[in-house]
């Protein structure tokens, strides 16, 4: 499975309006709920925030990868959001976050959950790609950029 198997253009929002971590996460979950089957957006939101209590998902370099495994998400899905002004995620480097990947999935496949997190991390380790994402003018342009970059990597098993 590739990242773009669970992320499509409808799940990209380059204009997040949330002014803090929780608002941005909620905005991404709402976007996800319009395109995928989620039994409860509230339970997913609560699970993501519980995960944040364990350790921030603000991984540095302006990136956060909030995620959870939950029974109310019967399939894996990824949503990408960009908050142009940046928000405080209490990141490990203490810098604001502009690029947010939300990953949700079922509890019964932790291996794939880890592989998708790894794929996102690997893609986002590319500084040039991060800068290009911040310069995108449309959701489609951002999705196409991720899709093209992913073509350089092997498929996830």
Image (spheres, rainbow, N blue to C red):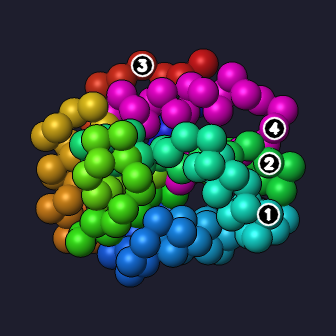
In the image, is residue 120 part of the stretch drawn in magenta?
yes
At x 27% / y 31%, what residue is drawn? 125
Whichever of labels 1 and 2 marks the residue nearer the N terminus, that label is 1
How far across and how far down the image is residue 7, in percent?
51, 51
Disc 1 secondary structure class: helix
Badge nearest the viewer, 1 or 3:
1
Mark-to-mark CA distance, 2 and 3 = 27 Å
State the residue in front, 76 or 26.
26
The residue under label 4 is: 107
Residue 142 appears in the picture as rendered: no
The residue under label 2 is: 70
Q: What main secondary structure does the magenta stretch of the protein show?
A: helix
At x 55% / y 33%, what residue is drawn? 116
- Quadrant in which the C terminus appears: top right
In the image, is residue 122 part of the stretch drawn in magenta?
yes
Residue 32 image label:
none
Badge nearest the viewer, 2 or 3:
2
Disc 3 secondary structure class: loop
Mark-to-mark CA distance, 3 and 4 = 25 Å
At x 74% / y 69%, what residue is drawn? 41
Mark-to-mark CA distance, 4 and 1 = 13 Å
Please rate how many residues cluster around mark 3, counting C-alpha atoms within 10 Å: few if below 14, some from 14 to 19, many from 20.
few
Q: Which residues are magenta?
A: 102-123
Q: Residue furthest bottom?
A: 17
Mark-to-mark CA distance, 1 and 2 = 8 Å
How far across and how far down the image is residue 59, in percent?
38, 39
Examine the rendered structure and indicate whether residue 54 appears above or below residue 152. Answer: below
The residue under label 1 is: 43
The residue under label 3 is: 154
């Amino acid at each position: 499975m590739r990242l773009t198997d669970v992320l499509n253009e409808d799940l990209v929002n380059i204009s997040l309006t949330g002014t803090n971590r929780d608002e941005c996460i909620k905005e991404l979950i709402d976007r996800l709920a319009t395109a995928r089957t989620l039994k409860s957006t509230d339970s997913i939101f609560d699970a993501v925030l519980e995960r944040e209590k364990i350790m921030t998902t603000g991984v540095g370099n302006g990136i956060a990868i909030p995620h959870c495994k939950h029974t109310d998400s019967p399939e894996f899905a990824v949503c990408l959001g960009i908050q142009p002004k940046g928000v405080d995620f209490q990141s490990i480097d203490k810098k604001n976050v502009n690029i947010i990947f939300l990953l949700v999935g079922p509890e019964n496949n932790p291996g794939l959950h880890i592989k998708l997190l790894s794929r996102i991390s690997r893609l986002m380790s590319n500084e040039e790609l991060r800068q290009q994402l911040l310069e995108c003018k449309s959701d489609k342009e951002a999705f196409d950029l991720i899709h093209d970059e992913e073509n350089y990597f092997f498929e996830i098993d």
